[in-house]
Amino acid sequence: MTQITPRRANRTLLSRQHLLTRVDEDAIEVIDRIVGIQSQDPSSAFYALASRIDDFRPDELDALLTDREVVRIALLRSTVFLLDGLDARWIRALAQETIDAGVRANRSHALVSSTPEAVHADAAELLRGRALSGAELKSALAQRHPDEDPAALAAHARCGLPLVQVPPRGLWKDSGAPTYQLLDDWIGPGEPALVGDDARKELIRLYLRGFGPASPKAIATWSGLTRLRPLLDEMAADWELVELEGPSGEVLFDLDGLPLADPDEPAPVRLIAPFDHILVAQADRYRIADDAAYRRTVTPNGRSPGFVLVDGWLAGMWRPGDGPDVDVELFSEPTRVQRAELDSEIERLREFRASR
């Protein structure tokens, strides 16, 4: 079994995420290839694409959102993702069992006399054919379920139904508060393209294409799904996946035929997005950050800074400053060449932010 070194794992991950060299491709193609973008912060998708696409223009993503080609929706781990609307349909259906379990486990979502099914039905009726703001949905549900906490009602609706956060939420210049609409009303009715184990296998393929090679734990952590190891073994037995040995002797899986990057490939400085899932919700984080460095980026309120990569590894944080300014905190002193690269990336990001 081939053993992969930490540096080769790092360069392969960066290559598949388009963080070694920016690409000259359409935003929708990059969004598909990196398996959507974690998007709790509406601006994070724009920063994620700007770090990966040469001369990315925010109005390209705005058009994808308003034309209903990509959507913002609670998906894996109940986290808001931005991704292709048709993929959202089958991935949301696949994730629904895990989302429901999370709602049941959250005591603040407990209901007094109503049932989740009744709340889902009422919310679907209230939303059918129209969009409602979070406050409007909460108020309307509270009128139908007066014994319940309105916040709990809204949480059950958001988690139990595939609700899109429709524009202007998520636009570069005009983002507003979340306004919700049923996915089928927004992109058009349809059935999930994949279900059951076929859907799970396709999600595994997508993850490995964008993040592999990876351990079973990494796939499960990112997806929020369980019982994946039998599928991985089945796909490996069918010669669809190959097995590699990780730096600590762990088993890694990858798509057969996908190349591994040259460990000596240069990795330029990159300022990547807040919540970027190259770092967040990753069990194999050794590929890009050590534990001590990552802990420095974790905040008490759960807000994520932007991340600074130097020579491919987490080396600092950035946050929006006044106007287009960018405030950077490094964890160690860079070399003169790295400082020049960092200054260039900061100026690039300042110019990008100035377009807002």
Image (spheres, helix red, strand yellow):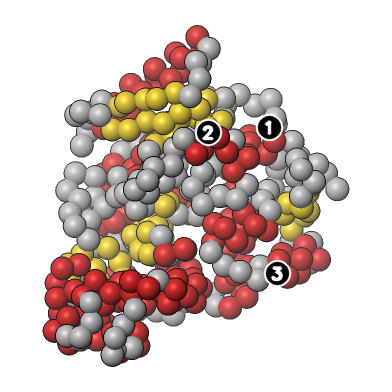
**Local secondary structure at mark 1:** helix
- Name the residue carrying label 2: 293
**Local secondary structure at mark 2:** helix
| Position above or below: 141 against 38 | below
The amino acid at mark 3 is Leu
Residue 286 is left or right of residue 328, and the answer is: right
Residue sitting farthest toward the top: 336
Task: Give the image location of residue 347, x and y in percent.
Answer: 33, 21
Distance from disc 2 to disc 1, alpha carbons, whole Å, reads 17 Å
**Local secondary structure at mark 3:** helix
The amino acid at mark 1 is Arg
Comparing marks 3 and 2, which lies closer to the viewer? 2
Identify which residue is drawn at 31% across, 83% down: 111
Residue sitting farthest toward the right: 1
Q: Quadrant of residue 195?
A: bottom right
Comparing 148 with 191, the one in front is 148
| Position above or below: 173 against 198 | above
Residue 225 is left or right of residue 26, and the answer is: right
Distance from disc 3 to disc 2, alpha carbons, whole Å, reads 33 Å
Identify which residue is drawn at 76% across, 43% down: 248
- Name the residue carrying label 3: 231
Tell me if I can see residue 340 in this picture: yes
Distance from disc 3 to disc 1, alpha carbons, whole Å, reads 28 Å
Task: Give the image location of residue 311, x and y in percent.
Answer: 57, 25
| Position above or below: 171 against 136 | above
Residue 80 is left or right of residue 165, and the answer is: right
**Sequence-first tag of 2 and 1:** 1
Task: Give the image location of residue 108, x and y in percent.
Answer: 33, 71
Identify which residue is drawn at 76% across, 52% down: 251
